[in-house]
Image: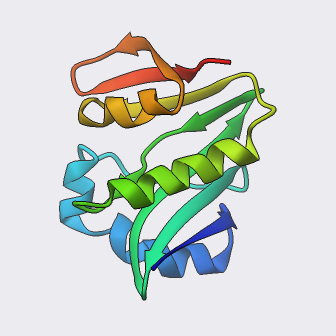
Amino acid sequence: MIQTLKLHGTDKQLYRLVGPLVMDPEILKSNNNYPFKTTDQFLWFIAINGKEVVGFIPVEKRGGNIIMNNYYFNRGGEEAFSRLLVDALAVFDEEKNVYAVVQIQHRMIFEKYGFKIEKSWKQYIKMRRSE
């Protein structure tokens, strides 16, 4: 059974839950070796199956914008990730500027929840949620 949590970016429980993942070389490689970051401006949505973290979405509030970036979900974890995305969008439902930096292979997941492409790069897409 998947459980979802919402934690502030400096919550000590956050480090305990996602620390082993964000320091795992394979997960870093899947994130193109870009480090995961957090501050008190972040809200993290975390999916847990039993005792295992199966995915997360860090959401940053920066200058009137909501930015989803550097997310992770394990192989086969699309359902858990979709639940996290729904949870995050519910929290920021009133926000007009919700952006996501998305790995190209996950584009359809975000499109399912109303995101449209704004800009494309080689491996990522900047998307914005349509109203």
> Would you place residue 98 above or below residue 119 in this image?
below
Give the colour scheme of this rendering: rainbow
Quadrant location, the C terminus: top right
Q: Residue furthest bottom?
A: 51
Horizontal and vertical percent for residue 120? 33, 14
19 sits left or right of 61 in the view:
left
Residue at image location 22% in from the left, 60% down from the top: 75
Q: Residue furthest right?
A: 94
Q: Splitting the image into 4 quarters, where does residue 6 fall?
A: bottom right
Residue 94 or residue 66, whichever sits in front? 94
Horizontal and vertical percent for residue 40? 72, 56
Residue at image location 66% in from the left, 51% down from the top: 42
Residue at image location 23% in from the left, 43% down from the top: 32
Residue 20 or residue 88, whichever sits in front? 88
Q: Splitting the image into 4 quarters, where does residue 128 fall?
A: top right
Residue at image location 51% in from the left, 82% down from the top: 16
Horizontal and vertical percent for residue 68? 54, 39
Residue 81 visible in the current orientation: yes
Residue 8 or residue 128, whichever sits in front? 128
67 sits left or right of 120 in the view:
right
Count of numbered badges drawn on the protein: 0
Horizontal and vertical percent for residue 121? 29, 17
> Would you place residue 50 above or below residue 3 in this image?
below
37 sits left or right of 91 in the view:
left
> Would you place residue 96 above or below residue 118 in this image?
below
Quadrant location, the N terminus: bottom left
Residue 37 visible in the current orientation: no
